[in-house]
Image (cartoon, rainbow, N blue to C red):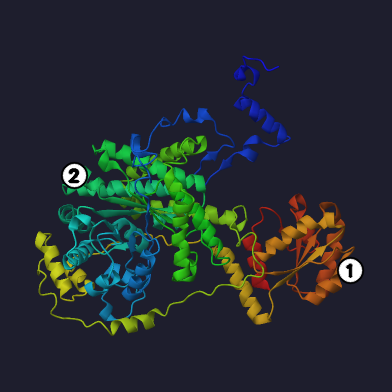
Amino acid sequence: MIEKNINLEKDFPYPSYDDWKKTAEKDLKGESFEKKLITKTYEGINLQPLYTQKDLEETGFERNLPGFEYFIRNTKSSGYLSDGWEICQSIPYILPTQVNEALKHDIKRGLNSINFCPDLMTKKGIDISRGYNEDFGKGGTNICDYKDFSECLEGIDIEKFPINIDSGYDGIIWLSLLELLVKQRKANKNKIRGSLNIDPYAFFVENGYLPSEKEKVFDNLSYVINRTSKNLANVKTIGVNTLPYHNAGCNAIQELAFGIATAIDYIRELQKREIGINTAANNFRFTFGIGSFFFMEIAKLRAARLLWSKILEKFGCGKEESKMFIHCRTSFYNQTEYDVYVNMLRSVTECFSAVAGSADSIETNTYDEVLGLPDDFSRRIARNTQIILSEESNLNKLIDPSAGSYFIEKLTYEVAKESYNLFRQIEERGGMYNSLKEGFPQSETEKINMERMKDVEKRKSIIVGTNMYANPKEVKHEIKLQDYKRIYDKCIKHKIKKYDSLKNLPAEYKLTDKLIQETSTALSDGVFLSEINERLYKDTKHTGNIKTLTPVRLSSKFEELRRLSEDYTSKKGHKPRVFLLTFGSLSQHKARADFSRSFFETGGFEVIYEKGFDTPEDAFQSLLETGPVAAVICSTDETYKELVPSAGKLLKEKTKNIKLILAGNPKDQENYYRENGVDYFIFMGANAYNILKDILMKA
């Protein structure tokens, strides 16, 4: 008979954290709890194996709601329920006609925000008529004049879709182009949305210099802000792009701190030019990279909104203006050249992080980005990744799905705290501009990248299909090389330079209302952007030079190994071969043989894996017939002392170039085995990249 009065708390008491820890330590059978169950991230944060409500006591924001209290959970109280995130894919083709065709195609299939990327030649203001330059087509579309700009957006409703332009270090010309387009289309200015994304520091760290004095750059920025506030009030002007740091290998805390420090530098420069804090804050659009650590990336976006609103509060900024607009782009740093379809899966988890972190706008990289320009198929997959998360996974039906997770809430707090500490260090150095000149963000980023690379080399960090689980039968995708010189020659044929076309521009450079009008008039007359740029900056000097950051990829070193193997194959007619000397029963050699096969397949080797042998003499005829570059002894530690001397002696007597490898960690026996012919040792934690490269270079 069931009792009427049941006291669940009394009859079924909750175990405490200490009770759980004691049980966990018992399961570890003497191994260290800290070493086995606590994980240290590249951010220096110790991830606990278990989080409880007690972890929220320090955060102070466990009861926050979306749209309130520093916007940790979202800047909008309704989240994605009222408006979804913007699906904002770049179209990085070189020619305007290609961009226009792709935009029209993609808009019909779910694209609802336009990311417009001029090439580096355009951003630098290099005159296309003066000859071919290696910056032509680099990073986007070559825009020579207004006709090119207009052609990109031909037939597209500019009132319906936000237009986001990567303006580089200055936006005067881009604002002139946009105003001219609006005027010629007779569009409603109040319906034009998007951003100019003027971000001089991103240009600075990517290129090592600014094409103008810092003072003039910020004079121009303040001018553009004042102009857009009157004429295009829904167009943001200031970009803070952290991708140069993210794609060079920085951690989440660094990326957030560098971004916030950049924005605060911009605010201070604008305040000197009498731009109010509310006006300045309302013009920011932040771009963050999204990496593969799912929970860390969610925490980063939540921490970003927290930090931004708290810092702006100190400036006296209004609540509405302190809402952070966040655009996210999935990581180039994590993409691979081999097993490229896995890049699709990486982008899915990264995009999911951006959505769970309440991003306002998202770009999903195409899986073939590392191979060259995308095609219709890769653009479709990238775009549909977002559409599926919205339409099929229903992630837009719940506001801040990560809220309440003890882990994510505590991680958000720790990321915010450590990012703020790093931000203060930058402030103590005189701000982000001075820090960039000193090379502080660059060197800090490189330190983390080197740490990440070392872990990949040792396979402590896994890149699926590259340094682990490689596909030995993979047919490599071809790099889609562009003949930039041929495209340039085709492009320049249609450009006729007007030597008198600058007559509408004033001889003296002044930031007046007439400047944009006169610039727009010159543009409508067919003036090249480079000509206007040259006139606007004819009396300026470059600022720099500083240490640059260039995009890298974690997989690059193992891709180098694969290319070395391919070179060997093209010369010899077959892959470099490794013969597994498996001794004893299956149980004695299988684990190390499987490990060895995986180890060498990541370098593009063909692994000869035959049945177990009784003695080295039994194995050597088979070994010699296959013509390997290396042989791996696979058995138990107990049998190695007897096997290695005889195997080493046989190998050195009958062959000259075959390297002998021992599967296992020799520890204090290393000298003994080396004296008996062993060249390398492979085990968990060994530097696979160094070993494989050395073998390939000597093959």
Q: Which mark is residue 375?
A: none
Task: Point out the frontmost of discs 1 and 2.
Answer: 2
Which of the pair 168/148 is nearer the observer?
Answer: 148
Residue 643 on image: x %, y %: 86, 60
Q: Which mark is residue 617?
A: 1
**507 relative position to 390: left or right:** left
Identify the image quadrant of residue 111: bottom left
Q: Which secondary structure, mark 2?
A: loop
Q: Taking 69 as reference, is 226 left or right? A: left
Instruction: Give the residue displayed 57% in from the left and 37% down from the top.
Output: 48
Q: Quadrant of the N terminus?
A: top right
Marks 1,2: beta carbons within 8 A: no
Residue 161 % position (x, y): 30, 59
Badge 1: residue crowd in 10 Å (few <14, some 14–19, many ≥20): few
Mark 1 or 2, nearer chain start: 2
- Please say whether residue 422 is visible from this viewpoint: no
Say which residue appears at 61% left-offset and 23% top-offset: 14
The residue at the point 43 percent across, 61 percent down is 383
x, y percent for residue 2: 68, 17
Give the quarter of the image for residue 563: bottom right
Residue 477: x %, y % from top left = 55, 72
Identify which residue, 641 or 676, lies in the foreground: 641
Residue type at the position of mark 2: Gly
**Quick one: quadrant of the C terminus?**
bottom right
Amino acid under disc 1: Glu
Label 2: which residue?
276
Query: Crowding near pointer 2: few (<14 within 10 Å), some, many (20+)?
Result: few
Q: Is residue 494 shown to the viewer in this render? A: yes
Instruction: For mark 1, give the secondary structure.
Output: helix
- Left or right of residue 197: residue 79: right
Please tell me whether residue 36 is drawn above or below residue 684 in the rendered image.
above
Residues under labels 1 and 2: Cα distance? 84 Å
